[in-house]
Structure formats: C-alpha cells, structure tokens
C-alpha cells in the first residue's frame, strides 16, 4: 500500500489517488516512485477508500507540523472528489486550526461533470491551480489532457469561480516553458487578478 500521508520539506501532504486526466511532460511521477519521506506514492490495485485515508490520518502525528496540509500526490486530487471533500471535512473537525490547500490541475468540473468550485472552496482554504501554459494549444501540447481543447478554458473558468469564495487562489507553472510563454502566463494571471508562482523544474 502506498503512503497516503507523507511529509516533504516540513509540510504534510495527502496522496489520495493515482488517477489523472493529463500526461504533463514535466510530471514528477516520471522521475521516481516517491517524494519526501514516502516509500511509494503508487497504489497497487486500487485508489484508497475514505476509511483507508482516515486510518492513515488518525495514525499520523500532526503535532510537529503547523503549516498547511496539502492535497497533492501522484495523481489529481479532484479525481477522488468525494474522498477529497470528506477528508477535508474530517481534517477540519479533527484539527480545526489547520489550513487546507489543494494543488489541482483545475479540471475538476470536467472530471466530475458538475460545477465543483463552490464545494471545494467551502471546504479548503487555498486553491493552487496549475496554469502551465498561456494558451489552449500550448496547454494541450504540454499537458496532453484527455479533455483536449476543452481543458484550458475549463481551468480558467474554475479559477474565476474560485475567486468568488473566501479562499486564496493561486496559479502555478513549472519553468519548462519559454520565457515568452512565462511572460504571457503572467499577463493572463494579472488580467484575472490571480497571483502566479513559477516553480523550478527538478528531476529529483
Ligand atoms: S496534472 Fe499533475 S499529476 Fe497529472 S500529469 Fe500533470 S503534473 Fe502529473
């Protein structure tokens, strides 16, 4: 069984699914089986049930960690939408002071065939959305979403929706694209009023 709860650079992360509708060129999953103190982030056989997620949370000593708890593993968290929301609710009950963040590809509405920003924002505090590219064509070429040309507009719409709620919304990208594309992403993010974080690509 893969690690569900793991730590990396003094933050607690939750790995709740290996499913993802993208195949990003820079995906960290290509580089190894684990991150931080995890043994492996690959589930064998099935993605975890809520009871399995809850059991790992209950067994983990959160007292040493005061920062955000981050939904981010070897898959897109909103692919496990029900477990994501249930787990967020459970954590808020168990650790009322905790700040919950999701690192998402922003494709939740397409994945779940319904608007999801409201429920996500009601249960989490920080929504970090991978922008990755300045246009739909460039996004498709880099991230290969199964939703093809529907993906990029859906990401922007999801980000706009999240801004309506009482959460911190951020964009991110990995610096594997050209400087010009990074500048165009920045312009797009500025136009939408969403801060953009440029992450350095590491193959580790
Ligand atoms: S969306 Fe995330 S998990 Fe999915 S392929 Fe891209 S980087 Fe990997």
Image: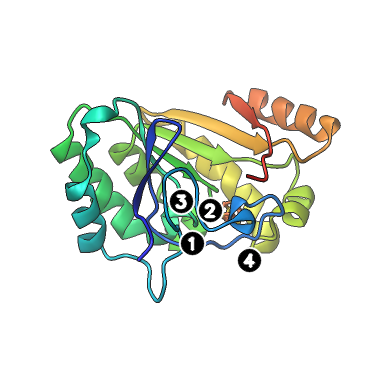
* Alpha carbon separation for disc pair 4 and 2: 10 Å
Secondary structure of the residue carrying numbered label 3: loop
Q: Is residue 16 shown above or below 57?
A: below
* Mark in the foreground, 1 or 3: 3
* Alpha carbon separation for disc pair 3 and 4: 19 Å
Residue 113 appears in the figure: no
Quarter that holds the N terminus: bottom left
Position in image of residue 65 (x %, y %) = 29, 29
Residue 107 — which label? 2
> Contact, CB < 8 Å: mark 2 with mark 3?
no
Residue 73 — which label? 3
> Contact, CB < 8 Å: mark 1 with mark 2?
yes
> To which residue does mark 4 refer?
146
Q: Upstream in the sequence, badge 2 or badge 3?
A: 3
Q: What residue is drawn where x is 36% and y is 57%? A: 81
Near mark 4 (Cα within 10 A), the count class, few <14, some 14-19 or many ≥20, is few
> Contact, CB < 8 Å: mark 4 with mark 1?
no
Q: Upstream in the sequence, badge 4 or badge 2?
A: 2
Quarter that holds the C terminus: top right
> To which residue does mark 1 refer?
111
Looking at mark 2, is its residue's CB closer than 8 Å to ligand 1?
A: yes
Q: What residue is drawn where x is 21% and y is 30%? A: 63
Near mark 1 (Cα within 10 A), the count class, few <14, some 14-19 or many ≥20, is some
Position in image of residue 140 (x %, y %) = 73, 56
Q: Upstream in the sequence, badge 4 or badge 1?
A: 1
């Amino acid at each position: 069984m893969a690690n569900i709860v793991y730590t990396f650079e003094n933050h607690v992360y939750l790995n709740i699914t290996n499913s993802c509708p993208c195949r990003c060129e820079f995906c960290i999953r290509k580089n190894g089986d684990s991150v931080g103190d995890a043994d492996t982030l690959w589930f064998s056989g099935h993605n975890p049930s809520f009871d399995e997620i809850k059991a790992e949370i209950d067994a983990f000593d959160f007292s040493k960690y005061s920062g955000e708890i981050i939904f981010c593993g070897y898959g897109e968290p909103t692919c496990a939408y029900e477990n994501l929301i249930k787990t967020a609710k459970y954590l808020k009950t168990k650790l009322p002071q905790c700040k919950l963040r999701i690192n998402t590809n922003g494709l939740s509405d397409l994945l779940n065939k319904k608007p999801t920003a409201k429920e996500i924002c009601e249960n989490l505090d920080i929504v970090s959305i991978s922008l990755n590219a300045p246009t739909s064509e460039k996004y498709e070429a880099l991230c290969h979403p199964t939703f093809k040309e529907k993906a990029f507009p859906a990401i922007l719409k999801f980000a706009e929706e999240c801004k309506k709620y009482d959460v911190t919304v951020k964009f991110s990208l990995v610096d594997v694209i050209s400087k010009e594309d990074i500048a165009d992403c920045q312009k797009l993010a500025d136009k939408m009023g969403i801060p953009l974080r440029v992450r350095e690509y590491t193959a580790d």
